[in-house]
Image (spheres, rainbow, N blue to C red):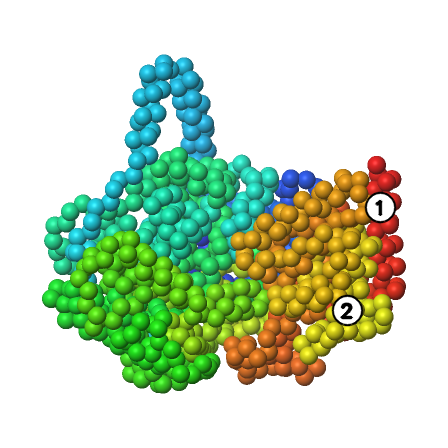
Amino acid sequence: MCDDFSDDDGTDELLSAISFDILPEVRKDANGKNSSPSPKETQKQDHVNVPEEFPFPFIPYNIQLGFMKALYECLQLGKIGIFESPTGTGKSLSVICGSLKWLRDYKEEQLKQLESLMKEEANTNELIEAKSKDAKELDWITEFSEKTKKEEELNKILEKKALFDADKKIKGKHKTSKRKCHELESEFDNLIKSSSEDIKDAFEAELREIHKLENPEENEDAEIVLSEYISDNEGDGEKNDSGGEDGNDTSEEHIMKIYYCSRTHSQLSQFIKEIKKSPYGDDVSVTTLASRQNMCINENVQRLKSLTLINDQCLELQKSKKSSSTKEKQPKKQKQASCPFYKVERIEHYRDRILTEVRDIEQLVNLGKQMKCCPYYGTRFSIAAAEIVALPYNTMLHRSTRESCGIKLEGNIVIIDEAHNLLETINNIHSVEVFGSQLCQAHSQLSQYIQRYRNKLKAKNLMYTNQILFLLSRFVVYIGGVLDTPSDSQHLKKIESKIFTINDFLYETKLDNINLFKILRYCQKSQISKKLNGFVEKYQPSSVKYVPLSVKKPENSRSGISQFLEQLSDKQNSCKNTPNKVPEPVQITNEPPEMRSPLMHIESFLEALTNADKDGRIVLNRKNLLSVSSIKFLLLNPAVEFKCIVDEARAVVIAGGTMQPVNEFKEQLFQSVGVQPERILEYSCGHVIPDNNLLTIALANGPSGQEMDFTFKSRNNVQTLNELGHVVVNMCNVIPGGIVCFFPSYDFENHVSSHWTTSGVLQRISNKKKIFREARKAGESDKVLNSYAQCIEKCKYSEDTKITGAILFSVVGGKLSEGINFSDDLGRCVMLVGMPYPNINSPELKEKMEYLNANYPSDPGDKTAGQIHYENLCMKAVNQSIGRAIRHQNDYATVLLLDRRYQKPSVAAKLPGWIQKDVKNKNFGPAVAAISKFFASKNETKIVQN
């Protein structure tokens, strides 16, 4: 909206009765910031005309229809939705059909009202002119004011109408393009088939020539040296405007759209497949965003090991595409290295192609290879004209990443799927850890950069780069290191963890008088991290480890082989000196991620230090070596980073198979940023399976009556472990197919397996089930899972009735506890041994609990917010593990909760709604009888059906 009309009193009832937007008009709050429709505005309608029928590929189940109706209402009223629909109930299809039905209806209704308003405005203008002729005493100023106001309002309507027409034109263009592409491809294929061998050979030779990549030439130093820094607006408290590292900022108008987010690329690909199945599959424009690691087709870049290195190299290759933003004239440069796939003309053509047909990530990459065009940037250029944009969590939830991709949330719909861990995900994305090795490496690289170009750098550049050096040095010294010795050879005197508020940390490091906002603005405007990255790439100074400035070595003094052998030796020694600790429940290495130049990562840490003091903490981890010691910013308040999404989007929907407990989302994510309770819409449905297809038992004791107590102090009790072994052996005798047994941690699973090997329990289990164990290394999990599945499939058709299937020992929170499909015989039983509470002695967890206790009230039972959070972490992990079993309508399984604590009503209340109503508390004997009867009835049903 133009600033000239920001004081419009809005008295025209005709105009205030409707939102004119293809992208609804961006609203501003009292501070001039974008805001979503207020609860009062969205609640003007007492009820919404929700359709009774929705386009669907088949007759929907009642719970699917209910889901779509609730979703339609949520989007229409601009609410915040919390939707729970168990895995296997067709949640993705319900999301697609419900949201697209609303989007199409909304656009159609808006278009009708715009056309009606255009007619009414024209009639109103005629009345004003007629009135001015009849009213002899009408003030000419009033007449002019009314006429001008009406003309302006009509122009606004015409602009909105033009956007609708543009949307329609884009769709028509895409349909025509799709038809022409098919015709041309068919014509080309026929032409080649009928050609002579000489023509075919010439064509193949030309293709081979096109495939050849240009050998990049060396960049001139002019691209590396910092330009003069001129900034008239070094605001102390302003956040940096993100120009977007990807350089794809475009003025193209965005149509109204749905942003769909999920955790992994495989989940996004599955969602795209569901769109293809839906009735909208042929006429909806869809694009999918993914990382460079998944979408880059430049083989030279893909060969790099890490995502960070791939990102660095990609940005480096784009230098020749970026125009300088400074006034200083650049000296004439030679031809610069660039990516042969980053061509604007090709990208525009690619953009038009991908919007003509729904494609998953793999198909987008293949099309990019065919067209010799970058899929990573091509998909970003297609955002404006897409009705659905599928993207991973990190892209949506991280503000600077979101803005750099050109994502505009104003007035659009945001749907976040698999949102059960959304709070933890936001905290993790915005928590930044920098290691001693990275700080030393950045200090060394920047020092050498300044030394090389000192005579070419302007005074202001020298001032800021020296300030950055000072920051880096203070961090290294505070950890306990020095700057004249390699970080991996510096042994620290004291091993400890300490936590500070942000202000206390800045005071302790003597940085409380440094203006971090100015430094961050300088980093962004000067692109110092990218310049340094180019410098490192060209001259390779200390690219692997820290080399003190006092040790001067001539360039190229070592051969490539000797340098390689030295680096290899360093890595081996580093591995020997680093303790091999495996945190629970997933394996995390102690070594920092490999980066060519870590300054950009350190900038993220500096930006984190500008957060409000109450919203985060600084964790200092001193270990035996400086290289693996770290300083970490820990975000405690996820709402502060999610607020802009809630404020800008028309409606936000978070959905998942198990969203309990929902109060956590309402209190910590929505109500804490001012969302009124009446704006939050909750929807939860049961499962599509019949009640008799699921048997859930909470078992408090084993066959000898020994209590199943797996609290931390009792879990290693020999009698308890033996009793657990007897339970598992008995269950293997009566349960067919596959059993998945979840343990609270890798260490406990290893301890139990070792004990059972000694006691003979594993041998007894193996008489009925082949035993598989989840691997700690993520890369080996797929191999274990495939072997497990093949074994069960083989047992189904084997004449040997002795082995009835397999059992998989897995870990809650591990790779196999989320996102893995144990349908049918792969998961006839899911066992949960104990309750996977996190380590209560973790300094970070303690700090989080204290933060919650200080900012949120206790529950009616006088349980503190911190205690509730601690329990929720456990139960959310339990619920995800349980959800691995039932995957479709005809599936059936048992769930065994092996711990006395599962029989507590307060614990059962936090299980998924579709399970908690049928949980049965039993002793061992009745439990075995019930399970035997359950599977016997399923076997009889199979016989009858056959």
Foreground: 879 or 790? 790
**Left or right placement of residue 867 versus residue 533 in this view:** right
- Label total for image: 2
- x%, y% of residue 785? 63, 50
Foreground: 762 or 155? 762
- x%, y% of residue 242? 33, 61
Residue 722 has which mark? 2
Q: Circle 1 — which element? A: helix
Q: On the rendered image, what quadrant is the C terminus found in?
A: top right
Q: Circle 2 — which element? A: helix
From this viewpoint, is residue 133 visible? Answer: no
Foreground: 394 or 822? 822
Q: Residue at x 46, y 74 (%)?
A: 634
Q: CA distance from mark 2 to mark 1?
A: 31 Å
Type of amino acid at the residue the image marks with label 1: Asn
- x%, y% of residue 501? 43, 82
**Residue 132, located in which quarter of the rendered image?**
bottom left
Q: Residue at x 64, y 76 (%)?
A: 868
From this viewpoint, is residue 93 visible? Answer: yes
Type of amino acid at the residue the image marks with label 2: Asn
**Left or right placement of residue 216 versus residue 735 in this view:** left
Residue occupied by mark 1: 939
Foreground: 162 or 267? 267
**Residue 466, located in which quarter of the rendered image?**
bottom left
Q: Residue at x 70, y 74 (%)?
A: 716
Rendered position, 791 above or below 540 = above
